[in-house]
Image (cartoon, rainbow, N blue to C red):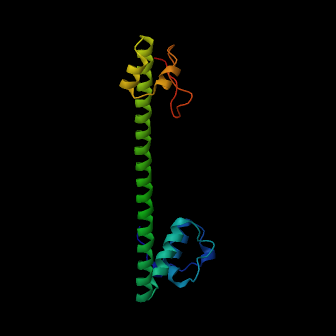
Amino acid sequence: MFVRLTKFNKSLDECETFRDRLIFALRHAHEFKERPEQLSGKLFERLFSIAKFTNFTAEEQSEYWSTMMNKYDQQAALISAKKEGIDIGVERGIDIGVEKGREENILQTAIKMKAKGLNIALIAEITGLSEKEIEELDTCGYGALPAKAGTTPRSA
């Protein structure tokens, strides 16, 4: 569709369709200090933002671009920091999970060794658990020690 904006002579009140309002806005956007109520919506917001920018002096345009670049830099920094925070959190979660798995494995190994009747001193030497911890182990298949934080009982 081809439109000669100079030939469009409707007033804003005469614009009944979206197309009329759009053509009116294209023809007159640079004339308004504020966007008229009848020209609402994202498209018109963007259009008037562009029209306002084109009326800026060279100094105002330079200041505008400087402000926008700072805004974009801040947004990029926030996005990067958020991603880095998520990555660190995932990494820490994996480390915690691996450590809990090691602890659980040591407890299950000690339970099995105790159930087989191995010497408590030998079990302590092999697993790194104290003799007291080994004595408190339940050889019926649940190895979490009540005194040991961060472990959960699981069957052998």
Q: Residue at x 52, y 28 (%)?
A: 152
| Residue at the left extreme, as displayed | 126
Q: Can residue 7 be spotted in the picture?
A: no
Q: Residue farthest to the top?
A: 116
In the displayed structure, would residue 33 be above or below residue 81? below
Which is more toward the observer, 98 or 85?
98
The structure residue drawn at horizontal position 53% and vertical position 70%, both measured from the top left corner, is 45
Which quadrant would the C terminus be assigned to in this image?
Answer: top left
- Vertical side of 141 occupied by 79: above or below: below
Q: Which of these two is toward me, 10 or 152?
A: 152
Q: Is residue 126 above or below residue 117?
A: below
In the rendered structure, the answer to whether residue 140 lies left or right of residue 122 reads right
Residue situated in front as seen by the camera: 57 or 105: 105
Which x, y percent locates residue 78?
Answer: 45, 62
Residue drawn at x 40%, y 35% is 98
Rendered image quadrant of residue 4? bottom left
